[in-house]
Image: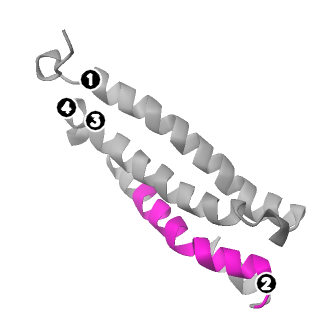
Amino acid sequence: MVTSQFFFPETSAVSSIIQQISVPFTFANIFQSLWCASFRPKYRGKYAFISAAMLTIIAYSLSKAHVIYASSPHAITKSQYCLLFLPLSLHYGWTTAATLVNWNGSVAKQDPAHISTPR
């Protein structure tokens, strides 16, 4: 995604959009790498929330990228959207759903004595 801006003229609208989403997209990739590292055995059990936190940051970063290109739908063609931005939209949706599932799993793995519930 970041290198695709080299294939469009600098004055094109899609090039401007790609430049704007480069920072949140890069953050999403950094935290995706950290998310993969959070599946090491030492992060299981009571530390299961670490992978959920990484997924949360990935989804947040992709949401920032999504807002940028969704706010200017007429600036890009359908083929540019399908090639460049549809995969980001799908990944954003997947990480959002996976974040909720991961938080549920991490809470379920916690010791019940440490979770306060309303009485």
Real-space CA distance between mark 2 and mark 4, rounded to the nearest whole angstrom? 47 Å
Disc 2 marks which residue? 8
- Magenta stretch holds residue 23: yes
Please report the bounds of the magenta region as a residue range: 11-32
Real-space CA distance between mark 1 and mark 2, rounded to the nearest whole angstrom? 48 Å
Residue drawn where x is 48% and y is 60% of the image: 28
**Secondary structure type for disc 3:** loop
Residue 103 falls in which quadrant of the image?
Answer: top left
Real-space CA distance between mark 1 and mark 3, rounded to the nearest whole angstrom? 7 Å
Disc 4 marks which residue? 46
Residue farthest bottom in this picture: 10
Quarter holding the C terminus is top left
Callout 1 touching callout 3 (CB < 8 Å): yes
Quarter holding the N terminus is bottom right
Residue 41 falls in which quadrant of the image?
Answer: top left
Callout 2 touching callout 4 (CB < 8 Å): no
Q: Specify few, some or many for label 4: CA neighbours under 10 Å numbering under 14, 14-19, or 20 or more.
A: some
Disc 3 marks which residue? 48
- Left or right: where 82 falls relative to 90: right
Callout 4 touching callout 3 (CB < 8 Å): yes
Question: Which x, y percent locates residue 26?
Answer: 50, 69
